Amino acid sequence: MITNFFEGIGAYALLMTKVFRRPDRWRLFYRALVKEIQLLGLDSIGIVVILSIFMGGVVTIQTAFQLSDDPLIPTYYIAMATRESITLEFSPTVVSLILAGKVGSNVASSLGTMRVSEQIDALEVMGVNSASFLILPKIVAQLLFNPILIIMSLFLGLWGGAMAGDLLGLVPFEESVMGYRLEFIPFENAFYALIKTVVFAFIIGSVSAYSGYTVKGGAVEVGVASTNAVVRSCLAIILANYLLTDLILTS
Amino acid sequence: MIQAKGIVKSFGENHVLKGVDVDFYPGKTNLIIGRSGSGKTVFLKTILGLFNPDGGSIHYGDEVLGEMSKQRRKTLRQEIGMVFQGGALFDSMSVAENIRFPLEMFSSMTEHEKDARVKFVMDRVRLEGADQLFPSEISGGMQKRVSIARAISMNPNYLFCDEPNSGLDPETAIVIDQLIQEITHEFGMTTIVNTHDMNSVLEIGDHVVFMKSGHKVWEGTNDQVLGSTNADVEDYVFKSKLFKQVRTALRK
């Protein structure tokens, strides 16, 4: 099992060296990139909107539940704690985990299907670097678009938190805004969130592409690869999250 | 001309090719036949350069495949057309886009020239009016024709077909076989077809190579195959009732 793991890491690294090559035709690369942004980015907006609003609401309710018993704590501190949770953890990590499920399975199954139906072999026979042609636009699309999704998620999460606090009478809307602005260091937390997002976007794109591209067999194996893509991406995101948090916040 | 000299290929302990020597001639449909597991597909992929042989060499004209530079190998690939067993059409592209793809990727043609070339090959394989359809919207026979059109769009010197008429009805299979032979003769390509189908052998086998257990055991033409006295070929060719009757009729 350990041997398999290290063989897998080696195969993944070798695949990435094939992926990051200059595209044969830039025009085809840009065309593929636009398609991938549509498929992997724009089509994910809906789920990110719903998830972020409700996630913000839940964080506010939970924080209020913990802090509201103490009359000495002003209610806008609930909003401040919500802001920290959403910015530092929930938006970049939870949304990335959800995207790993949605986008990762899509990437792995589409590449896996191309592999088992010999479409990748057809590209190789033509002399096309299939890894670069198929995978690079997917990774670049996510590196470009996931930060946009996460920024959107940050705003919607905070808005959802403020709305939930106001509707349930836990934190008035104005106090939520005050709490969100309290001791806020512009760009520091957002910068941290964006660094995590970019790393997670690379993980989602590359790990799921590796799972799909290396499929051997038929439809069953494509299904297994799709599941593996999600599991591996999620595990890699959780590990990277720990390392990045340790690296950025404690050093 | 393609020459395979002493090709040896193993996967672990599984010795698939055990020293195969074959010459494939230009302007002829060269067929590789044999039972499943005889090494046909591995041999075809080795000739294509998708597998590196453990021993022996592949010659494209005067050049040895294993000694070519990366750049030369890449340009050689543009001289090769391949028809896969399942068609291997890009399902996100329309018929015309599939055929146009190699031109977009490698040619320096103008848009107008590419349009003209796509129209020419589509007409050549009798696919008029199908340009905007997607692979999922066309029949298996049409998919094979699209695959052939894509394979010849760059006007290749070498055409490889891996079981091109598998899964097709007998009538469509004959149409595909005849199409392959026509374009081979018309463009003077070196065509190598990997097949199980005895109808194909008799229909288009200008040069037939019979493989068994990783060895070439017989070669000849489609006219010679029915009269072959090689026990392995006889056993393979006359397995079906139909061909047993053909043999009886021939002996009378």
Image (cartoon, rainbow, N blue to C red):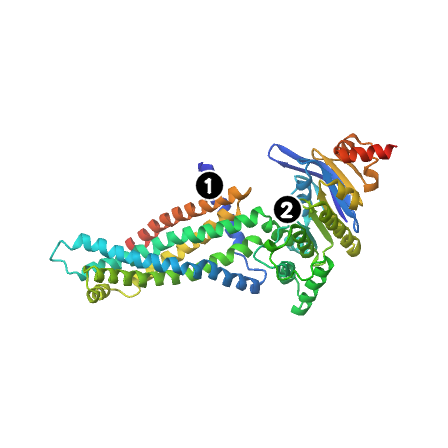
Residue A63 in the figure: left or right of residue A198: left
Q: Is residue B171 above or below residue B12?
A: below
Same chain letter for marks 1 and 2: no
Q: Secondary structure at mark 1?
A: helix
Q: Chain of mark 1?
A: A
Q: Total marks drawn?
A: 2
Q: For mark 2, what is the residue?
A: B50
Location of residue A223 in the rendering, given as x and y in whole percent from the top left corner: 49, 44
B22 and A154: which one is in front? A154
Q: At which x and y percent is residue B126? A: 72, 58
Q: Quadrant of the C terminus of chain B?
A: top right
The residue wearing badge 1 is A6
- Amino acid type for the residue under numbered disc 2: Leu
Q: Is residue B208 above or below residue B97?
A: above
Residue visible at 24% across and 62% down in the picture: A162
Element at label 2: loop
